[in-house]
Image (cartoon, rainbow, N blue to C red):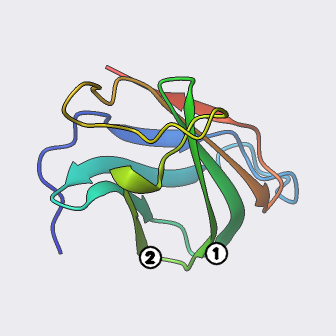
Amino acid sequence: MALRPCLLGLVAIGPPAVSSNAAEMLNVVVGMNVHGLAIQNRNSFEISECEVHVNSRFRATFSKIGAGSMHEISLAELSASDSQRFDPRSELVQRVFIVCSRPSVSGATFGP
């Protein structure tokens, strides 16, 4: 499944803690498709135990994305701490923040 032109862009997240080569960075693409957010792992390794934060308010989790694979998150999966769901009729995806525990990496911010 192809991503439509990505409004959030190509992303490099800080180097994995297990790497001694600073040039070896995570390569992840975040975009939108008909289902919601599409997160593509372009690395040769799995990323896992991840949280996605949208617009600094809404949050969803996912367990893993295999090497070279994509994971989709429906906008309806995103919820705020008060249990309010993301409503694409009244909200725009403006900022996405992803934190994954494995491999150990720093967070990354994506935005226009």
Q: Quadrant of residue 42?
A: bottom left
Q: Quadrant of residue 87?
A: top left
Q: Residue 89 vs residue 111: left or right?
A: left
> How crowded is the residue under tag 1: few (<14 C-alpha within 10 Å), some, or many (20+)?
some
Q: Who is closer to the viewer here, 60 or 84?
A: 84
Residue drawn 63% across the image and 75% down it? 45
Label annotation for residue 68: 2
Q: Residue 79 vs residue 15: left or right?
A: left
Residue 6, above or below 46: above
Residue drawn 78% across the image and 62% down it? 103
Q: Who is closer to the viewer here, 19 or 1?
A: 1
Label annotation for residue 46: 1
Instruction: Pinpoint residue 21: horizontal percent, then vertical percent.
Output: 77, 51
Q: Who is closer to the viewer here, 89 or 94?
A: 89
What's under tag 1, amino acid-wise? Answer: Glu
Residue 59, above or below 1: above
What's under tag 2, amino acid-wise? Answer: Gly
Please tell me which of labels 2 and 1 falls first in the chain.
Answer: 1
Q: Residue 77 vs residue 93: left or right?
A: right
Q: Who is closer to the viewer here, 1 or 22?
A: 1
Instruction: Pinpoint residue 70: horizontal percent, then vertical percent.
Output: 40, 71
CA gap, disc 2 and disc 1 = 8 Å
Instruction: Pinpoint residue 56: horizontal percent, then vertical percent.
Output: 57, 23
Residue 65, above or below 95: below
Q: Quadrant of residue 33?
A: bottom left
